[in-house]
Amino acid sequence: MMKKYTLILIAAVALSFTGCKEFLDRPSLTQMNDGNYWTNENNVRLFANGFYANYFTGYNSSWGTDYAPLRGYTFNDDLTTTGKQSIFETQAPSSRASTSETAGWLSQYNGPTWNFAWVRKSNLFIERINTMNEKSLLTSEAYNHWSSVARFFRGYEYSRLVSVFGDIPYFDKVLTDQDLDLLYKDRDDRTAVMDKVYDDFVYVLDNMRLSDGDKQYLNRYVAAGFISRFMLFEGTWQKYHLNNTAKAQKYLELAVRAGKIVMDNSAFKFTSDFRSLFGSMDLANNAEVVMYRHYDAALSITHAVASYSNTTESQYPSANLDFIKSFICNDGKPYKLSSVANADVLDVPNLIATRDPRFEATFVDQPIIQAATLLYASKFIDRKGPTFKGGSYPPEYGSVTNTNDYPVMRLAEVVLNWIEAKAELATMGGTAVTQDDIDKSINAIRSRPLDAVAIAKGIQKTAPLSIATLPDDPDRDADVPALIWEIRRERRMEFFYEHTRLLDIKRWKKINYMSGAQNPDLLRGPWVNFAQELPQWLVEAKEGKLKVEKADGSIVTYDGTNGADMVGYYIPENISDRDAFTDRVYNAPIGRNQISEYLDKGYTLTQTPGWE
């Protein structure tokens, strides 16, 4: 049977928009005959499939890295590389616009460039479905579903654009070259835009089909998962950046509603071990997975992410000491409060043994020189993959021929979005979070089964979180309540190398976490005993380069004679902090050329605040 993403590729080719020379030039509607295409539901479905690769990216495809875990989401406070750390944008670019339907990607913002091609495509979709409905070419049920699909994609795109740029022009119809006042309108306030998105999402939750095929097809549960994500983002942004309690409550309440839709479906449950969510060759029957992207070598649908998890390929950047210290111990406490033996010994084998099982499922159990910080992630490959050595791997574990599936939307994200939204609402006069809420979310995640490999290593499940005895982490930010702190910790452990971390610290207004000057642990790796664990690096070539930091903060540099003293927190080679940055980096600047194009037509396009 032909899989979903083959259909997507066909649709993308058949229905692609043509390019254009200027930002505001609009291409022809489609390369097909638009007048006779919109005649039946099968054609509507084919057009909808053309959105999938853009929005449900999975591991991307071939060597693609945009919106892909491990290879794309590499700019955040979890990750460190050798040399100078990646810097924030320092000036407005000359141009930032695109009209292409290929995935535009700004890695420093985890979102799209200044591009309205997908907005236009979703508006076109909405208009054509409305016309079909007027001609009675769709049943009322089919109309409700497909108009929901189209409005979901419009809301998805605007949610991403707002997360990157803040204020953004809002378009709710297809424009022609004659609509100059609309084509060259200035940016609308982000809250006004997100109110429109809110309306689209409410419509989706009320009208989209509960099922439209297997778990590779968009349905109400998939949409609800994404809606919980986007509404949590905007609700917390409104709270922490704009101090707009009314709007924060509005969006967070929808996040809670969306999350509950998924959680109330008994088909979704935590029956999978953590590693199988990412290394499995077929997620069709995984009950934690709400939607997945399937890869199939026979259909030439493959990716490269597993090959960068096989312990032979390099990982730059990789997990730093700050991330390590955030990982909870298996008694449910942060390491400074834990009663687990050796909880404060931060070498890799001890971390594997003492931390929440997700640590063992995420990382190799010894330091690996292929990782920038020596902590190598094997999260995105199955247990078998790393057992092949010497650079000789079967196709599924090497090169660009990997075929493990990706969980595009999974229950863990939904419940963590849901519990965070509830906790935030409680701080604004809403109902207090209960132990039952915690049991349905954080504790449900912690009760996941362990696989045979973890059990053989003696890995233990983490103790449940008790709302009556929340840990009082000495490292907690003073302005963050203990419950919300623990929810944020849970997200950090759950989503390492995935889509969330940079967007999380931005919406929480915690971009200062990215500063090595304020957080020196960003510039360190785990505790390593080189003589015992990596003696191959005690060589002449590493003299004057290999360094560790002792517990007292003193630094020891390898000189060829002091190998026995090379014990401490690893200092990545030639490490230096990223350049200083200001709060303007929360949102991206637009291109100077785009501002000039507006001026040439007699209109004004306002630059992002702080980037003038």
Image (cartoon, rainbow, N blue to C red):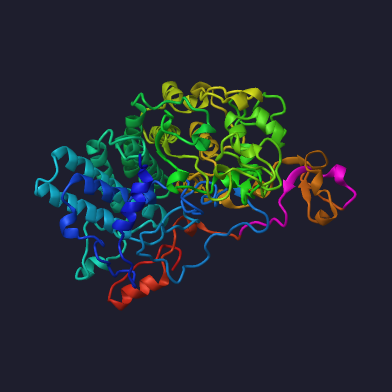
Front-most of 563 and 481? 563
> Measured from the top left, where is residue 227 in percent x and y?
34, 41
- With 368 as the anchor, is 541 left or right in this view? right
Out of 250 and 444, give the one closest to the viewer.
444
In the shown orientation, is residue 104 left or right of residue 306? left
**Position of the N terminus by quadrant:** top left
* Residue found farthest to the bottom: 600
Is 328 on the left-hand or right-hand side of 24? right
Q: Quadrant of residue 531?
A: top right
| Residue at the (54%, 44%) spot, across then down | 497
Q: Position of residue 412 (x, y in %)?
A: 45, 33
Considering every residue shown, the one lying at the far right of the view is: 561
Q: Percent position (x, y) of residue 288?
A: 43, 30
Question: Viewed as shown, does residue 603 lie left or right of 229?
Answer: left
For the image, the number of numbered tags is 0
Q: Is residue 357 visible?
A: yes
Q: Which quadrant of the rendered structure holds the C terminus?
A: bottom left
Q: Is residue 361 above or below residue 24?
A: above
Question: Which region shows up in magenta?
Answer: 560-578
Of residues 248 and 591, which is closer to you in this image?
591
Compare residues 220 and 29 and report the one nearer the observer: 29
Q: Which quarter of the picture shows residue 333?
A: top right
Is residue 381 rendered magenta in the image?
A: no
Asked if the stretch drawn in magenta spans residue 569, the answer is: yes
Question: What residue appears at the point 65 percent right and 45 percent down from the top-left corner?
Answer: 392
Is residue 488 among what the camera can see? Answer: no
Q: Position of residue 281 (x, y in %)?
A: 49, 36
